[in-house]
Amino acid sequence: MQANLYYAHDPMCSWCWAFRPTWERIVKALPENLAVRRILGGLAPDSDEPMPQEMRHYLQNTWRKIEQRVPGTRFDFAYWEHCAPRRSTYPACRAVISAKRQSLDLEEPMIFAIQQAYYLQARNPSDTEVLIALAGEIGLDEAQFAADLSTAETHTQLMDEIAFGRSIGVQGFPSLVLERAGVCRLLNYDYNDPQVVLAQLV
């Protein structure tokens, strides 16, 4: 029987970045009758307001906590000095949708490009010009990408994915939901051990 494993994530979620290596190991070990479906989370709505100092400190502390809890996860703290942070992840989410419009094969490379830019290269994926540059770097048509990024249709698709995630029990990111025969179950996971998820798929 065909089943779906929904992975709810946000490309600018630092815990999703930490989970990435374990998630990759999970995907490689999945049974053939299980299809992976990524759902964008929309962690923070559009905003042009500078990120408050309190939120900056909170996120920097989160990065430090992740580095301790998930060995091997790296962050470039120069981001907080060289960029103008905003609490806005919807643009990055729409960028993933826009990449998929050109090629389904470029969904994952776009997610990875956004994560690398944010966490390792001190670039701000809340900025449209950064997203367009990343699109070009992974081989997308920049003009088409820029057009898709700003359409109402792209934003509607993001809102639909957020709503769908909530309807199947997603409450945070990352989240894993197993769906079999129309029944959805939220899975437990460990940031360092893929077997925690794989054992629940038997």
Image (tube, rainbow, N blue to C red):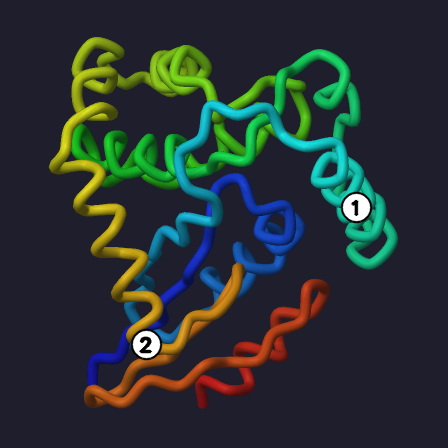
| Residue at the (26%, 46%) spot, across then down | 158
93 or 72: nearer the viewer = 93
107 or 48: nearer the viewer = 48
User: Label 1, on which residue?
Assistant: 72
User: Label 2, on which residue?
Assistant: 168
Residue type indicated by callout 2: Ile
32 or 15: nearer the viewer = 15
Residue type indicated by callout 1: Gly
Tell me if residue 183 comes above or below residue 105 in the rendering.
Answer: below
Q: Residue 94, position in %: x, y? A: 31, 35
Label 2 near label 1: C-beta < 8 Å? no
Q: Residue 139, position in %: x, y? A: 32, 17
From the viewer's perspective, is 175 left or right of 68? left
| Residue at the (39%, 40%) spot, across then down | 108
Residue 93 sits in which quadrant?
top left
Tell me if residue 49 comes above or below residue 45 in the rendering.
Answer: above
Tell me if residue 59 comes above or below residue 16 in the rendering.
Answer: above
Work out whether mark 1 precedes mark 2 in sequence or the reverse, and give the earlier one.
Answer: 1
From the viewer's perspective, is 25 left or right of 121? left
Q: Residue 116, position in %: x, y? A: 59, 29
Query: In this figure, what is the number of numbered marks?
Result: 2
| Residue at the (78%, 51%) spot, across then down | 66
Residue 54 sits in which quadrant?
top right
Task: Tell me the mark number nearer the camera, choosing from 1 and 2.
Answer: 2
The crowd level at tag 1 (other Cα within 10 Å; few <14, some 14-19, many 20+) is few
Residue positioned most to the left: 153
Q: Residue 201, position in %: x, y? A: 45, 84
Tell me if residue 177 comes above or below residue 110 in the rendering.
Answer: below
Residue 179 sits in which quadrant?
bottom left
| Residue at the (59%, 18%) spot, across then down | 123
Q: Describe the element under mark 2 as helix, strand or loop.
A: loop
Which image quarter is the N terminus in?
Answer: bottom left
